[in-house]
Structure formats: structure tokens, C-alpha cells
Amino acid sequence: MKKLNCWEYKRCGRESGGIKVHELGVCPAASEEKLDGIHGGENAGRSCWVIAGSMCGGKVQGTFAQKYGNCVICDFFNRAKKEEGSDFTLSSVLLDTLEKK
């Protein structure tokens, strides 16, 4: 089974070339290369919960600290966590990766 990126699962249209790019811009999760390959995703497509400015419920979200409460109840977050099982990368590790140059 192919592991879906968040934009494929949520169908938000904010991936590069997506139908909502002209209106809302490319999502930071779709363009964040530092997390490419994490959980088998493209860019941060399977670690969107640590990316500021990603979208949830039709609204652009803020920083990790501001949005994480919503992310832990998100169907996509929980799907990715279940699919990865013991290989799930903790948010603290992902955030450290983002801070590195």
C-alpha cells in the first residue's frame, strides 16, 4: 500500500501544481525538503504536524506549539502514526532536524 502524503490524504490542493495554489500558495509541508523521506513521504508530507503554516480544517495553522493540540486528534496524523508503528519519528526529533542547516 502506498503511503499517502498529507495533501493526497486531505486533498487540500496546496501541493506544487495543486488546484488551490493560486488562492492559498504552496503549503510549507509540500515544500519543506529537510524532512524529505521521513515516514516514506515527499518533503514534509508525512510529518506536516511540525510544519508552521500548514493547513487544517480549511485554515492556515501557526507554529508547532500553537497547532499540535489539533494535530494529535487529526485523522491523518493518527493514520501516519499507526502506519509507522515503532518506526514513528518523534516530533522533537523532527523539530531538531528542521533547526539544522
Image: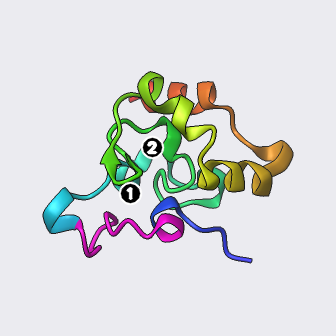
Residue at the (33%, 69%) spot, across then down:
13
Magenta part of the chain: 8-20
Residue type of the residue flagged with mark 1: Ala
Question: What secondary structure is found at the residue carrying circle 1?
Answer: helix
User: In the rendered image of this protein, does residue 84 appear above or below residue 100?
Assistant: below
Q: List x then y, in percent, for residue 58.
A: 34, 54
The residue closer to the viewer here, 37 or 45, is 45
On the rendered structure, is 99 left or right of 59? right
Identify the mark at residue 34; answer none if there is no mark: 2
Identify which residue, 99 or 4, lies in the foreground.
4
Front disc: 1 or 2? 1
Q: Residue 91 appears at what percent x and percent y?
A: 61, 31
In the displayed structure, does residue 26 sit left or right of residue 44?
left
Q: Determine if residue 97 is in view.
A: no
Q: Residue at x 53, y 31 (%)?
A: 68
Quadrant assignment for the C terminus: top left
**Rendered residue at 20%/57% (across/down):** 25
Q: Is residue 65 magenta?
A: no
Q: From the viewer's perspective, is residue 88 above or below residue 2?
A: above
Q: Quadrant of the N terminus?
A: bottom right
* Cα–Cα gap, marks 1 and 2: 11 Å
Q: Secondary structure at mark 2?
A: helix
The spot of residue 93 in percent (x, y) is: 62, 28
Name the disc covering residue 53, or none: none
Q: Main secondary structure of the magenta part?
A: loop
Q: Is residue 38 visible to the viewer in this orientation of the structure?
A: yes
The residue that appears at 38% across and 57% down in the rendered structure is 30
* Quarter residue 53 falls in: top left
Neighbours of disc 2 within 10 Å: few (<14), some (14-19), many (20+)? some
Q: Which mark is residue 30?
A: 1
Q: Is residue 92 above or below residue 37?
A: above
Q: Is residue 17 left or right of residue 12?
A: left
